Image (cartoon, grey):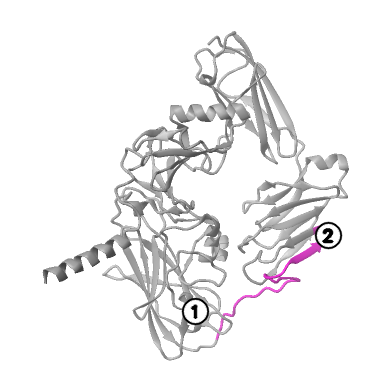
Amino acid sequence: MIFRIFICFLIGLSSAYGQQKYPQGYFQSPLDIPLYLSGTFGELRSNHFHSGLDIKTKGSEGFKVLSIADGYVSRIKVSHWGYGKALYITHPNGYTSVYGHLKKFSPEIEAYLKKHQYKEERFEIELHPSKKKLRINKGEVIAYSGNTGGSAGPHLHFEIRDKNSKPINPMLFGITVKDTQAPIINTLVAYSLDSISQVNQSAEPLQINFKTQKNGVLLADKVTASGIIGFGINAYDRLNGALNKNGLYSLEMKVNGKRTYFHEVKTFSFKESKYINLLIDYTRYADLRQRIQRCYVLPENKLSIYGKNINNGKLIIKNSLNYKVEIIAKDFAGNKKVLVIPIEGKADKILIPKKISPTNYFIKSKEFNKFSESGITIAFPKNTFYEDVFLDFKVKKGVAYVHKKNIPLRLSYTLTFDVSNYPKEERKQLFIANYSSKGYPIYRRTVKKENTFYIKTKALGKFAILKDDTNPKIKLSNFKNKQRLTNFTRITLKISDDLSGIKSYRGEIDGEWILLEYSPKKGTLTYDFSDRKFKKKKHLLKIIVEDNVGNTNTLEATFYRNK
């Protein structure tokens, strides 16, 4: 009997160990302050999943960032956008931790970085130190939190990646925050998924109302349906101590008590992240800025987050049968919100048919497609689109309108303008712009041939040839020409360009290159005087700025400093 109990214990222990895939207690927190999140792992972002945790830093910069374990600095990347100043530490257990949007690095790492920035004479840089160059101990201060890159406010972006560079939810390693709040579901949408299906006599996507019951369960209005249908929800989670709308950890759907759909965001690869545009109702997101997560899987969706689903989560509703659908949204802590949808199978006549808007341009998604109109050509490689579609393409007064921005693309396509009618001397200042949803022109990297300009892009919408004949602007910010700067720790300048945008900048003091830190969000260039010592008193500062079509401006100023 004792032997049998011991065997059962070993089996249970083995089972628990098998489920405990990620090491617990190995990694510590990356900050020495209480953790509150503004972003969770797997959160839905524009064209990608969020690959880490966004940790709040009390609205300020300069908090100590700690290495979560022993290891070595395997990568340093500094860029104007993205993660800004980012540090990668590889650990003995094969995982790599990532720290982004940093203000600055620890003195040893900062010195190593600046040495290479001055050697290569550029601010944006990517370095891969050897394993023995920058060894790090667990809990060591490696950097200070900031707001660099594409950050919308001070915080630490933190990741854990495996040996294949796949990001993994850091909470699986025991790095957790307090969360006692259930997710919030605020929108339910039903979809008819073939030509003869309907929900409440509609073949178009249909929003379904629901109410909260006394037990907290959400109960939807009863619907009638027939054929193949699916559901989707807009939902978010809130954690204790923060008002941010965070992402779900898992989403499940049951039909008459049996699971038919499930996904869980533990890990993913960066190359599959683009399929987020098939997980959500992309058209609704483009039109209403609302992300509806589908509780069914489209054929071209290659995400690895899905569990074993029945019929890819699609429901086959038969006449005269009743169905109870439950959608369960969970956060990492296990808090859940349940939405119940009663369905009556009823083969009603379709009163609201699916909208189809035929055009002269039909895209066969599995084929190469090329169309031209009034000197403008669009060429789509095969598999650019996820499905066949009618494309709205027209040209008015030299402006190309390539559909609406409500279809996701898998690949880039080529958009070509014939510029033979433009004078050759004028073409240098021309570029192709894509207009934002608010009507602002955005520079696209334009390849210029003799009589044609072209771009490669995944963007749809409005495009035009624009001319930028205005030089960038440069002005002194925190000092004046001929000012004594002996007690200054840094100097700051403002730079801007009115149309095509800043391409490059260069700074010199007394003819020698200096490291200028550019913040596109603020439009500032900053030089830190600690980078060098000055022997003479009078110095000449020279700043050269170039925009994306080659217009340049130069500013020269004198300052005095004797240390």
Query: What's the amino acid at mark 1?
Result: Ile
Q: Residue at x 54, y 62 (%)?
A: 275
Q: Residue at x 73, y 67 (%)?
A: 368
Of the 4 image quadrants, the one containing the N terminus is bottom left
Coordinates of residue 130 in the picture (x, y in percent)? 50, 36
Per the picture, the main secondary structure of the magenta-coloured stretch is loop
In the image, farthest residue toward the left: 1
The region drawn magenta spans 350-376
Within 10 Å of disc 1 (Cα), the crowding (few <14, some 14-19, many 20+) is many
Name the one closer to the observer, 186 or 295.
295
User: Pointer 2: what residue?
Assistant: 374
Image vertical order of residue 560 relative to residue 423, above or below: above
Q: Quadrant of residue 502?
A: top right
The alpha-carbon separation of the residues under discs 1 and 2 comes to 42 Å
Q: On the picture, is 440 further left or further right than 282? A: right
User: Pointer 1: what residue?
Assistant: 229
Contact between labelled residues 2 and 1, with CB atoms less than 8 Å apart? no
Within 10 Å of disc 2 (Cα), the crowding (few <14, some 14-19, many 20+) is some
